[in-house]
Amino acid sequence: MNHFELNDGELWCEGVPLARIAAEIGTPVYVYSSATLERHYQVLHDAIASRPDLGEPLIAFAVKANSNVSVLRTLGRMGAGADTVSEGEIRRALAAGIPADRIVFSGVGKSARELAFALDVGVAEINVESEPEIALLSQIARQKGVRAVMAIRVNPDVGAGGHAKIATGKAENKFGVSIGEAERLYAQASNNAGLKPVGVACHIGSQITDLAPMEAAFGLMRRLVERLRGEGLSVERLDLGGGLGVPYFHQPAPPSPEDYAAMLSRSVGGLGVQLAFEPGRMIAANAGVLLAQVLHVNARPDGRQFLVLDAAMNDLIRPAMYDAYHDIRPVRPRDGSPMNYDVVGPVCETGDTFTRDRALAPLAAGDLVAFMTAGAYGAVMASEYNTRPLVPEVLVRGGDYAVIRPRPTYEDILAREPMAPWL
Ligand SMILES: *Cc1c(COP(=O)(O)O)cnc(C)c1O
């Protein structure tokens, strides 16, 4: 569910017409709904926490999906933690007021500086992904005279998730260690004065709409926890990652939070560990749209119609990078039968094509369109390619909105580049 609805013939976000934001802030612009963010966190939390065999979870929002500090604070105030993959993301979570003991530090390549920073701020858990990383963490922790609270990220060798670029749980992917390795490393870490292993973690992919591979992976994780405990090792937390899909359209419907929680009961219920989750897309995707304006409708003699927008691949790269589908809705739908459009941006690359031959209600220059389901992996992946100013972000709450990342001016952009002194 989301809070972008037609109201009096035009698209609103909660109590604000999108056309008003376009007129006041300009386009392209990302617009997020506070109510949708809050609702998605709440339904996931409640579905899990209402089951006594699962207990109170740590739901650590995957900051990489949408790292705007106002978005993080909106979720943090609901009780969410943060799953982070860099020092910068840890700093964002802290700046948003998320306490360190709800911050998980994940990622395949953490530098010594980043590990030291995570130890200094006292994050809840560092998810280590390889033997060399464990050695580095132990060395840094010993120098500081602390024991690093850590979990081992396991690669359960289960395939899931739509696009190859976002599948992470197969043995050939770069993430995590095998289950056998995890058992050995966990025992070793337990005897290391610089380390305090508290659990195991997995994250098998993204945009997953079928619960079966998750259930298979989580069953393997359960047996791993049981084996570790059988060896007399303590396991307090089981981090099951993110990956729940969202309906982009033309795709299998994702499982409901209730079905997800029922699957959790079957696979890891009653294990007596704190469950942790790292949802990104499921929380943020449907909470945001990218609002753009039609610059030209360019009709070719062969009948092809190009809809040239003021948004481009540098603002929303998912279609170019993952062949992703985004529903495109006119903000003020006109009457008339649908037309087929190739929807493109102004960047000088053929890849700057959002979609081809898409049937849309008729559009004209000056009309506004909204790319739906753009709240995750949208603004965070934006760049200034072609020196197009970084796309701004707006957060709506009820009848109010705030600019939570302004569009830089050209002066801002140029001021970031000091001239080499010899020029
Ligand atoms: C990307 C990622 C997530 C979030 O994935 P979603 O599909 O957005 O839920 C969670 N955990 C880790 C380790 C990740 O890399």
Image: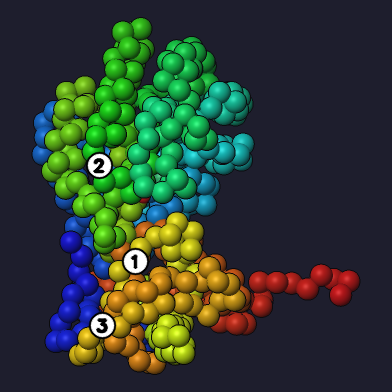
Q: Is the CB atom of the residue marked by disc 3 within 8 angstroms of ligand 1's nearest atom? A: no
- List the residue tagged with mark 1: 326
- Which numbered mark, 1 or 3, is in the foreground of this view? 3
Q: Three-letter amino acid code at disc 1?
A: His
- List the residue tagged with mark 3: 338
Whether residue 50 is situated above or below residue 165 in the rendered picture: above
Query: How many residues crowd around disc 1 within 10 Å: few (fewer than 14), some, or many (20 or more)?
Result: many
Q: Is residue 312 visible?
A: yes
Quarter of the view holding residue 196 = top left
- List the residue tagged with mark 2: 210
Q: Three-letter amino acid code at disc 3?
A: Pro
Q: CA distance from mark 2 to mark 1?
A: 20 Å
Helix, strand or loop at disc 3?
A: loop
Q: Position of residue 383 (x, y in %)?
A: 54, 67
Whether residue 112 is situated above or below residue 323 in the rendered picture: above
Rendered-image quadrant of the N terminus: bottom left
